[in-house]
């Protein structure tokens, strides 16, 4: 009997078959031991599975998927389980965890590449690059526990997209196990290869719905030896566009971070998160965190930043600023940025939106979205922050003071629909870097035109004809 979302019964002898492939340490069936794989980051879903399978090699992944394909057993791939859209939540399916596949297979400093297992933790890869005087620039709040396979499967963005691109741009080759167990070895370190379709892009951002990424060749860059960071107060929201443009021009486009920070985010961070501080003497409605970086330790970027800020002051675009005077102060500034995420939970229920619009439309998007959600829910508290340098706004909405949290969350679809209508009017995306998962499946169907959905379904049917890979996600 095949397993469904309503019934967790596996075919007779199936678990023994899987254990023969992965060994006793690679199969978890005890409910207590499975618990960490069933918890979801935001607490919006509760996972359910008959077993967690932890293969130790690509060959084992291949044999496990072949067995699932033959028996009709659906599979949910899982990396570090840090996703924000429910993409790694099982609803009765087998969970296949890549956590044991955590080896760096090769480092090629001359080619500026690493070849890695999908289960490698992101922070570990950053450290390996650093040991070779190189930089792997993907950086996000969950980097201490998220895995590169999950980053690839969601096309993760992070704080350095403005300069280095998102995960798709950081990837040269992939190794993928297809739903029927076949292995595609596309682990190339080539930067030029026009031999037909670039198949890796089918799997990057597919959230495990077409196959399981087991390895990757990722790009490295020269290691930065000079970083200069400033926390600034903007005259108003519209000033952010000119300040960003001037920063890029003044620094020869070495801006590696440009984060928009609203006053409410600073207030709740200082209120709830130990170590979060307000760097400016007076409160300001809109601030920004800016970072320049260079691989040249003798660069004059510090002087460049000071000159850029001085001109912005003279022209009235910036009204206050603090330049980090040490690495410790720089880390404090970035800690405040990450604290903005954590501080929202103590304030009550929060409806999350991860959207992108053209950079030139960011201020108008925030104004229009604020007006729309406030009309629908007076007292709602928008917390609009994030990687404005690449047009990505984390548009989160905290419940009104004193409101019932459950009642507020019950309006999730209604409120998000209002926000996404504004995004659509600006030809933006309702999912900038977090993916679709379970949460946004209906939104994808509503906001993608018919031909796009048809093409996506055709690809899914071709590669996963039995619909066993991460069912109910994306499509």
Image (cartoon, grey):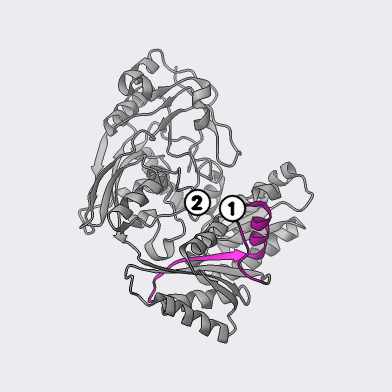
Residue at left 64%, top 60%?
A: 265
| Direction from residue 367 to residue 427 in the image, left or right | left
Placement of 183 over or under 310, stated as above or below:
above
Residue 259 covered by magenta stretch: yes
| Whether label 1 touches label 2, CB < 8 Å | yes
Indicate which disc residue 141 carries: 2
| Residue situated furthest bottom in the rendering | 314
Magenta residue check for 339: no
Q: Residue at x 75, y 55 (%)?
A: 377
Other-residue count near label 1 (Cα within 10 Å), few / some / many at <14 / 14–19 / ≥20:
some
| 33 to 166, vertically: above or below | above
Q: Earlier in the sequence, mark 1 or mark 2?
A: 2
The answer, for residue 372, to whether it is visible in the render is yes
* Range of magenta residues: 252-281
Foreground of the two, 156 or 464: 156
- Residue 470 to residue 302: above or below: above
The one nearer the camera, 175 or 285, is 285
Could you tell me which secondary element the residue under label 2 belongs to? loop
Residue 6: name its quadrant: top right
Q: What residue is shown with label 1? A: 341
Q: Quadrant of the N terminus?
A: top left
Residue that appears at 50% across and 37% down:
472
């Amino acid at each position: 009997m095949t397993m469904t979302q309503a019934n967790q019964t596996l075919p007779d002898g199936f678990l023994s078959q899987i254990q023969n492939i992965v060994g006793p340490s690679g199969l978890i069936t005890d409910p207590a031991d499975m618990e960490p794989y069933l918890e979801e980051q935001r607490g919006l879903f509760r996972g359910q599975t008959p077993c967690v399978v932890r293969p130790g090699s690509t060959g084992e992944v291949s044999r496990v998927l072949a067995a699932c394909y033959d028996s009709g057993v659906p599979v949910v791939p899982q990396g570090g389980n840090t996703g924000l859209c429910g993409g790694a939540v099982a609803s009765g399916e087998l969970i296949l965890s890549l956590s044991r596949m955590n080896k760096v297979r090769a480092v090629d400093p001359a080619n500026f590449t690493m070849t890695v297992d999908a289960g490698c933790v992101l922070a570990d890869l950053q450290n390996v690059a650093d040991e070779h005087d190189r930089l792997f620039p993907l950086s996000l709040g969950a980097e201490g526990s998220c895995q590169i396979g999950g980053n690839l499967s969601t096309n993760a963005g992070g704080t350095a997209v403005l300069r280095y691109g998102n995960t798709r741009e950081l990837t040269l080759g992939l190794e993928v196990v297809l739903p029927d167990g076949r292995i595609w070895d596309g682990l190339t370190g080539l930067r030029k290869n026009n031999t037909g379709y670039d198949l890796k892009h089918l799997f990057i951002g597919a959230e495990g719905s077409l196959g399981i990424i087991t390895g990757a060749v990722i790009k490295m860059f020269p290691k930065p030896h000079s970083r200069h960071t400033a926390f600034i107060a903007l005259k108003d929201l519209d000033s952010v566009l000119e300040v960003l443009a001037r920063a890029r021009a003044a620094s020869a486009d070495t801006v590696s971070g440009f984060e928009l920070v609203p006053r409410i985010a600073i207030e709740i961070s200082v209120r709830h998160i130990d170590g979060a501080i307000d760097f400016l003497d007076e409160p300001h409605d809109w601030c920004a965190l800016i970072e320049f970086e260079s691989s040249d330790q003798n660069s004059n970027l510090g002087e460049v930043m000071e000159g850029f800020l001085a001109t912005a002051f003279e022209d009235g675009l910036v009204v206050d600023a603090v330049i980090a005077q040490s690495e410790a102060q720089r880390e404090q500034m970035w800690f405040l940025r990450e604290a903005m995420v954590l501080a929202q939970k103590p304030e009550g229920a929060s409806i999350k939106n991860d959207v992108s619009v053209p950079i030139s439309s960011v201020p108008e998007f925030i104004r229009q979205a604020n007006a729309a959600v406030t009309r629908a829910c007076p007292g709602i508290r928008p917390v609009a922050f994030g990687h404005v340098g690449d047009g990505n706004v984390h548009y989160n909405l905290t419940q009104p003071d004193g409101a019932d949290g459950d009642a507020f969350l019950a309006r999730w679809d209604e409120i998000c629909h209002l926000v996404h209508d504004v995004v659509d009017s600006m030809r933006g995306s309702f999912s900038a870097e977090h993916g679709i998962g379970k949460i946004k499946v209906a939104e994808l169907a509503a906001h993608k035109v018919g031909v796009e959905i048809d093409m996506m379904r055709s690809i899914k049917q071709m590669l996963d004809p039995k619909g066993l890979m991460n069912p109910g996600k994306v499509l």
